[in-house]
Image (tube, rainbow, N blue to C red):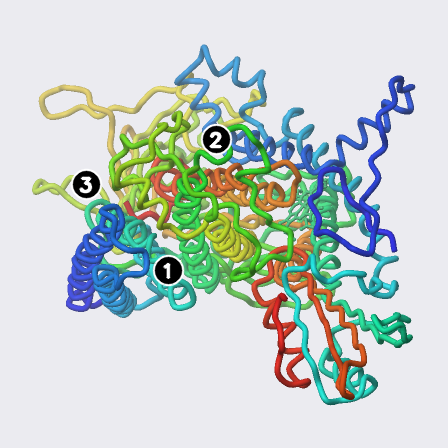
Amino acid sequence: MNTDLGTVSTLLVYGAMACYMIAMIAFAIDVSALGTGAAKDRRRRAAGIGMSLTWLAVVVLAAGTLLRGLAAGRVPWANMYEFTLMFTFFLTAIFLGIQRRRDIRYIGVGVTLLSLLALGLATAVLYVDADGVQPALDSYWLVIHVSVATFATGLFGVSALLSVLQLIKGRGRDGGSGASAGGVAATTGTQRGSDRPDAFTERPGAVSVSAAAAPSAVVDSAPAGAAPAGSRTGVLSRIVDALPAAADLERIAYRLNAVGFVAWTFTLVAGAIWAEHAWGRPWGWDPKETWTFVIWVIYAAYLHARVTTGWAANKFAYFALVGFMALLANFYIVNIFFNGRHSYSGL
Amino acid sequence: MSTYHPEGLKTAPDPGEQPPSSTPAGPRLGLRGWLRWMWRQLTSMRVALMLLLLLAAVALPGAFFPQRPVDPNGVIQYYRDHPETAEVLDSLHLFDVYSSPWFSAVYLLLFASLIGCIVPRTIAHARNLRAEPTRVPRRFSRFDVRSELRTGLSPAETERTLMAALGRRYVRRTGVEDRTTASGSQVQVRTISAERGRGRETGNVLFHLALVGLLVVTAWGQLVHYRGQIVVVEGRTFVNAPLDYDSFDTGAWFAGESVEPFRLRLDAFSSVFTDDAQPRDFTASVTLLTPDGAEREQDIRLNHPLETDSTRVYLSGNGYAPKVTITDAEGEVAFADSTMFLPSGDLFYTSNGVIMAPDANGGELQYGFSGVLLPTVLESPEGDPVGSVYPEALDPVMVLNLYTGDLGLDDGLPQNLYTLDTTNMEPVAETGPDGSQTPVQLVLRPGETVELPDGLGTITFDGLPRFAALDVRYDPSIPWMGVFAGMAFVSLMASLFLPRRRVWARIAPGPGGTTVVTAAALARGDDPGLRRELDRVLSPLGQMTKENS
Ligand code: HEM
């Protein structure tokens, strides 16, 4: 237990937070520039700065997490504080990974904001000194189960941000019209860059977003079911116009959710194996186990909704968002307020 | 080729097939009609989806209320704290959600739906696996991914090249179409249709079947399992037999033969704590004695149960069991044994316990001691013990009060081992120098003997062995759960990530001795790599002339 390393680790986490903060501002400037009528294909200097700082943040955070592990003499994901470090790392790394293949800088604000909030909460509330673990957690299943859980959380997180964008983009499209307007051609062989006219980009004038909402609502608020405002003047609608097509956003979100679902399935199974070793039963409906199962079922429902006729893309995007909300509840609420055998929060 | 479509399943446009015919709902349905209608509804995607959501919803209450099977004390506590609502909640099965009728109804319906859905799908898919790929569709123009090119190779060579390029993953068939050109001459057009990724559907079917398997083996395990719990003091041996356990529960189909005839001796128990009393390791060193006379020594630790042929032994708790010898007023040994003291739950193992000597004075005047054990004592400046400061027994002290009278052990009522029933007992008091009466407090360190007041006898603190609480489990379904969970996991990946693709090509003689190839590809579900795949297959033929013309 090396306290010096622990201190440096904490400093690095603060450093990462500073990077996230500036990156978030840069991304916000980029998004709002769209609203002032900047050309869609202009050089996005602010977004570039945001990307560089996000890269810096993830490297600094990785270093901080690594030092944390060295300070504690074990893997750095054994309590809520460290879980948050890992989750934030994966969230950002997955965002950066996708960004290398296609442009999703629009969710940069969301990614950096979510990271900042998570780290802020972690350092302010969840922090515990780097130390060994209680014997119940001393198992290689900890290494497997928890690391995959953080990875899955990161995947679902990026996907949820994309779903929010998709809902904003697709809004005003499926006002009760069911599968036709909001529906994404999920099961046809269409691919990106094909010549099929895209229902989402080729019909100007049909996107309407409540002009009353604040600009930040673009990334971090799920649209309420408010009646769309008739006029489409203003900053927001221009921003919305510049976003990628809802169908594209949906498709990326789906792919992340699919991988996330597999990772979550693994988390569930590995958890059961561990519980069998540690507590003598694979499944006992402990609150944490119950929530994990419920989240799994919600995402299974999402996957089914996606192949069910008559379901619009918007509807199953809500499933994914509910799933992510349950995931956050499972972490922040269940760990702290529910009495179960998963009392590893260290609080 | 027949494909099974559950009601409401979105599928890719399939050029080789008729759309699934939906039976028009007749105006009058007989009983059978109704049953069939209900079955179709139950096995439809929409109802499956609803049931899944319902399952998520009904599973949640169990996370909010204490559940009797896991946390019976929590339920008792809830009754104490909220007597008015507890009754109501209990009648709604909110304290045993996972065996409640409504929870069972939802998952049984879901699995009925799943079986109704997956069995026909499995049969259809099994038939499909042997079928040839669909014929080449007449027109390629409706596919998003298609190409056209011209090559110098002959049609036969072109066909061979394409077949080689497709590779082993594709099942394919070739054909020949006769076509009349614009000039009226007959030409032969070679066709290739190829398909890969039937593993995707296989994965999907296997995944759902694995879920059914998981449910079945879990239910079976519940029926045949047993679980025994016992507390053993260092040096003692217990027998794996229902009567030897402190508590023993079994499933409905439990059979006596499943109880393996072994004995287990706790040789030693040790623990490791950090300087600030955080637990780091617990080890129970045991010897397993089997009827054939064999002995096996092993350590049981958290996360490392002992495994016998069919049984596992887990370490579930520990504490101290002070060993004392009590002599009575006649100088006879009334009691000489170790007694479990229950850790009170603080970090320092402050433990409470009761030592009973029913044989004292021939049973006429029985002794009961009640008190605390402090593994590492903290003393006040006056030298009075005030608490424990460390969980290991570095400087253990036992502080006891003495009661005499009738312990009430003979009336057959179950006794709580950790509290003294003092209804028929008197505390033994001491008269202070000022004449005041205070209950006697006996303070003992290991090895010490203390005289009991009023010539009642002596008590000796002989030693401080530890005890381990062990859980013995037999559940033969566990390996099977592993098998089905693994199968579910692998087939889920196949189902989500194996691309399912069809590739078609027409090879026609073109002008000037060239060959014209038109090709199209179709995927099931999202497939970002489809374009690349078609390009890959066509690449040995040279440059593309048109993409998606
Ligand atoms: C125990 C509850 C169930 C779970 C956890 C579950 C899980 C899943 C998952 C994860 C998938 C995704 C695979 C993919 O997208 O290819 C899937 C697909 C599917 N499920 Fe289920 N399922 C359940 C019950 C059902 C039921 C009751 C039905 C039938 C009504 C059903 C029919 C299907 C079908 C047809 C697909 C394939 C969709 C496609 O072809 O892409 N499932 N299921």
Callouts 2 and 1 on one subunit: no
Which amino acid type is shown beneath numbered disc 1?
Answer: Phe
Query: At which x and y percent is residue B177?
Result: 89, 70
Gap between marks 1 and 3 measured at Cα: 60 Å
Type of amino acid at the residue the image marks with label 3: Pro
Taking A308 as reference, is B391 above or below it?
Answer: below
Q: Position of residue B103 (x, y in %)?
A: 63, 29
Mark 2 CB lies closer than 8 A to ligand 1: no
Name the front one of labels 2 and 3.
Answer: 3
B156 on left or right of A23: right
Instruction: Have a look at marks 1 and 3 and say if they share a chain.
Output: no
Amino acid carrying mark 2 in the image: Pro
Callout 1–callout 3 Cβ contact below 8 Å: no
Q: What residue did someone put label 3 on?
A: B385
Dot 3: chain letter: B
In this picture, is B435 found above or below B155?
Answer: above
Q: Which of B473 and B167 is in front in this view?
A: B167
The residue lying at 78 percent from left, 49 percent from top is B257
Near-viewer residue (B42 or B375): B42
The residue lying at 88 percent from left, 56 percent from top is B1
Where does label 2 land, which residue? B358
Cβ atoms at labels 2 and 1 below 8 Å apart? no
Q: What element carries label 1?
A: helix
From the image, state whether disc 1 or disc 3 is nearer to you: 1
Judging depth in this view, the residue of A31 and B39 nearest the camera is A31
Give the class, few, some or many, for how many residues have Cα within 10 Å of label 2's Cα (few <14, many ≥20): many
